Amino acid sequence: MLRYLTQRIIAFVPTLLGVAILVFLAIRLVPGDQITAMLGTEAGMLTQEQRESLEEYFGLDKPVTEQFFAWMGNALQGNFGYSVRHGKPVLSLILERFPVTLELAFLSVIIALAIGIPIGVLSAIHHNSPIDLFGRVISMLGLAVPNFLLGTLIIYVLSVYFGVLPNSGNYVEFTEDPVLNLQQLFYPALTMGFSFAASVMRMTRSAMLEVLNEDYIRTARSKGLHERTVVMGHALRNALIPVVTLIGVEMGYLLGGAVITEQIFSLPGIGRLTVNAISQREYALVQGVTLFIALNFVVINLAVDVIYAAIDPRISYDSKS
Amino acid sequence: MTANPETLTLHRQQGVVRRLLRNYSGLVGSILILLFAITGLLGAAGMTPYPPLEQHPRDRLTGPSAQYWLGTDLFGRDLTSRLMKGGANSLKVAVLSVAIATFFGTIIGITSGYLGGFFDNLIMRVMDIFFAFPSILLALLIVVVLGPGLNNTILAIAIVYTPIFARVARGPVLSLKEMEFVTAARCLGIRQWRILFRHILPNAMAPLIVQVSLALSWSLITEAGLSFLGLGTQPPEPSWGLMLSESRALAEIAPWLMFFPGLAIMLGVLGFNLLGDGLRDVLDPRMARR
């Protein structure tokens, strides 16, 4: 296990370096220079001297490799640059917005599990029955309705039929007013959690069907155990192992995929920060946020592998390697 | 009587189609995709009830009627025609982006898996870099670099999906290259590329075909999502995602503007998902859903 972990962490370094190079080069490839992007139409009023001094200030007059190492060196020290529009360092903006996205992702996972696991288990137990059909239709719909469509529909139904506007008013932090905060995050979390619930449902159902055919389940039943104990205590515990992996993988996607949901519900999370940075051409911010999300994604994937190995004793990474 | 290999392949293909149509998911998926393709092609050919960009100022925001089947938008443009043209654009993005990703991803994946060693390691590490981004974020980043628009959306989705195809194609090659028919082909002195493309690739096709269907569904969602954010198809050109986004401000007085593009996106994605499920059941019995 330790050897596997070490190998994964060593392999993690070049991936991250690659991610950093990709993000750095991507922004350099954007048409137009950064000074114009930063100042907009005002850039046209700059004299040649002013432009050169700005280029020197931002290090844009140096060779690309030198710029990359300077940027990388700064990033390693937590300096991702400065957002001119927000008037704040990029890192402090990210750290300010990240808790919103993190909370949204956690709530989405809770909603997904609360919907997905019970329906998945019922579908498997009542295999090929109307209950199963209902579960499968719900999961099909969950996978076919994209976030932006479900979010739009939720807002429409709430505002037209219930006179409630879920995205009105300023965002309130959990520590300020937990009830209002959860009210504000419930519908966005439902939007993101619904399609994830469909995946959880499918995974739980197929894993349960597989587990219910195992010998040890037959043994448990022949011992005379109550069916509920067999299902909940023996079958579900084992069937949930792949679901844990799914949660981990999805958590990474939820952190990055909150882009659209946060935009629809006007939540000040990291996804909305990204979209606004893109539309306002704030390249330092785009770079910082993308690198931050990719870093999270890679770390979460690594954590999933480790947790997977820890909870499933059948997996031994050491013998494989 | 000996059947020649071409007849055998034809029989096998007919068998797959027949089994797909007997499979519930496969049948419903095929019907939905056929509908999507027909309306999309009619839209692309300009065979719409009205020109999709034509404005009828007197008929602004009228509901579904005999004259305008699905109603009109804020500028009096016919929603049916715009949905058909939007479908054509979505279909174009989905088919082209997935075709590019399948082509390059498969070549990269099978070559990497077949050659193995340092080359394989290098290619897979590069692919890992792309996997380090949530896909919508990578697509966004690429669109930022290339600029918004239909063609750049195609390229962005293709770049995002290429590593996935490379991984899906590489997997089976790793075990196939150790099999006896490959050793036999080598002993016969058949050239490497011929072994790879004529002997190994056809045997690695099943997971790739399933992946194509799922990729088409994902591509449809991404195009609509990027257009929803204003980074995909640019107005006045219609796109389902853009139409949905524009409908939000008018949802209370003209709900049809939200309902029909939403339904179109859902049915399109559902169609590709069901087709993918059906293909998986038919082509890869081990992966079949119970």
Image: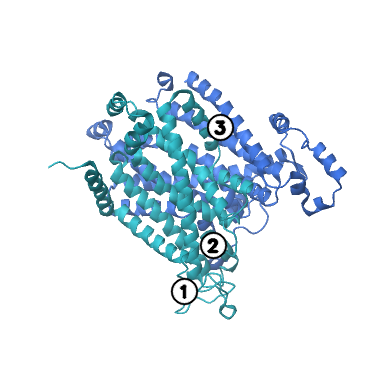
**Residue in front for this viewpoint, A213 or B216:** B216
Cα distance in 3D space between marks 1 and 3? 52 Å
Is any part of residue A190 visible from this angle?
A: no
Q: How is the image coloured?
A: by chain
Disc 3 target residue: A299
- The amino acid beneath tag 3 is Val
Disc 2 target residue: B244
- Above/below status of B256 relative to B277: below
Disc 1 target residue: B49
Q: Quadrant of residue B24?
A: bottom left
Q: Is residue A316 left or right of residue A91?
A: left
Q: Position of residue A119 (x, y in %)?
A: 38, 48
Image colour assigned to chain B: cyan
Image colour assigned to chain A: blue
Cα distance in 3D space between marks 3 and 2? 35 Å
Q: Nearer the viewer, mark 3 or mark 2?
A: 2
Q: Which residue is at the far left? A: B1
- The amino acid beneath tag 1 is Pro
Mark 2 and mark 1 in contact (Cβ < 8 Å)? Answer: no
Q: Nearer the viewer, mark 1 or mark 2?
A: 1
Is any part of residue B94 visible from this angle?
A: yes
Q: Position of residue A170 (x, y in %)?
A: 68, 55
Residue drawn at x 87%, y 43% as measured from the top left: A49
Callout 2: few (<14), some (14-19), or many (20+) C-alpha neighbours within 10 Å?
many
The label on residue A183 is: none
Q: Secondary structure at mark 1?
A: loop
Q: Secondary structure at mark 2?
A: helix
Quarter of the picture holding the C terminus of chain A: top left
Q: Position of residue B9 (x, y in %)?
A: 25, 44
Residue drawn at x 82%, y 37% as measured from the top left: A56
**Residue in front for this viewpoint, A268 or B68:** B68
Closer to the N terminus: mark 1 or mark 2? Answer: 1
